Image (cartoon, helix red, strand yellow):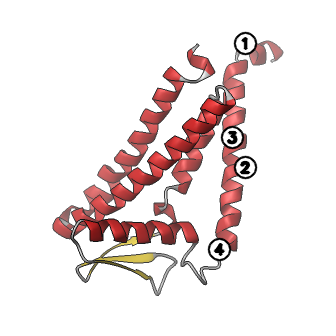
Amino acid sequence: MKDLLIKYRLVVKFILTFLVVYMVLSVFYKFYLQFSDGSKFYPDYITHLVAKQSEALLDALGYRAQVLPHPDEPSMKLLVNGKYLARVIEGCNAISVIVLFVSFIAAFSARFKTTFIYMLAGSVLIYTVNLARIVLLTLGLYHYPEQEHLLHTVVFPAIIYGMVFLLWVVWVNRFSKISR
C-alpha cells in the first residue's frame, strides 16, 4: 500500500486537494445560503444580483426586461416585453461552477500569485459568461419558445461547462506545476 501511495502521490495529492477545497468552499457557500434570509435581496444577494444584471443587459439590447420575486419559490422571474420567460434560481448564479473551477485549479496549483490571479480571472470570466448565457437563453426562449428543452438542457450548459473545461486545459498545459 505504501509503495502505491508513493508511486501515485501526485494523483493522491490532486484528489485530496480537490476534495478538501471543494468541501470547504461548498460548506461556506451552504452557510451563505442558509443565512441569506432574502429580506433585502431575494432569494439571496448573488442570485438577485445575477437577475438584476441580466435585466440590465436585456434592457441594453433594446428589450423591455423586468425581474420580479417569484411568489411561490426562491427565485426571480425574468420577463421580456411583459412575457414571463425564465426564472433565475440559486443554481443560475454560477457560484457552484466557480467552486468546481477553483477546486480544480487549487488541486493543480502553481506559484501562489499565478494560481490566485488565474482563479480570480477565471471566476470573473465564468460569472460574465454565465450572465451572457442567461441573456441568450432568455432571448432564445423569447424568439424560439419551442426550443426550450434544447436550449436549457443542452446548449447553454455546454457553453458554461465547455468554457470551464477549456480554462482547466489552459491551466494544466500552461501554468500548473504538472505541465513542467
| Residue denoted by label 1 | 7
- Which residue of the protein is positioned furthest toward the bottom in this rendering? 71
| Residue denoted by label 4 | 36
* Residue nearest the observer in this picture, 84 or 132: 132
**Marks 4 and 3: which is nearer the front?**
4
Q: Amino acid at mark 4?
A: Ser
| Residue denoted by label 2 | 24
**Marks 3 and 1: which is nearer the front?**
3
* Residue nearest the observer in this picture, 2 or 108: 108
Left or right: where does residue 97 sit relative to residue 150?
Answer: right
Residue 52: x and y in percent read 42, 72
- Which residue of the protein is positioned furthest toward the right in this rendering? 2
Closer to the chain start, of discs 3 and 2, is 3
Identify the residue at image location x=26%, y=56%: 150
Element at label 4? loop
Identify the residue at image location x=41%, y=54%: 130
Closer to the chain start, of discs 4 and 3, is 3
Residue 104 visible in this rendered orientation of the protein: no
Q: Which mark is residue 19?
A: 3
Element at label 3? helix
User: How many residues crowd around disc 2 within 10 Å: few (fewer than 14), some, or many (20 or more)?
Assistant: few
CB within 8 Å, label 2 to label 4: no
User: How many residues crowd around disc 4 within 10 Å: few (fewer than 14), some, or many (20 or more)?
Assistant: some
Residue 133: x and y in percent read 34, 56
**Marks 3 and 2: which is nearer the front?**
2
Residue 23: x and y in percent read 70, 48
Q: Amino acid at mark 3?
A: Leu
Identify the residue at image location x=83%, y=16%: 2
Element at label 2? helix
Q: Amino acid at mark 1?
A: Lys
Closer to the chain start, of discs 2 and 1, is 1
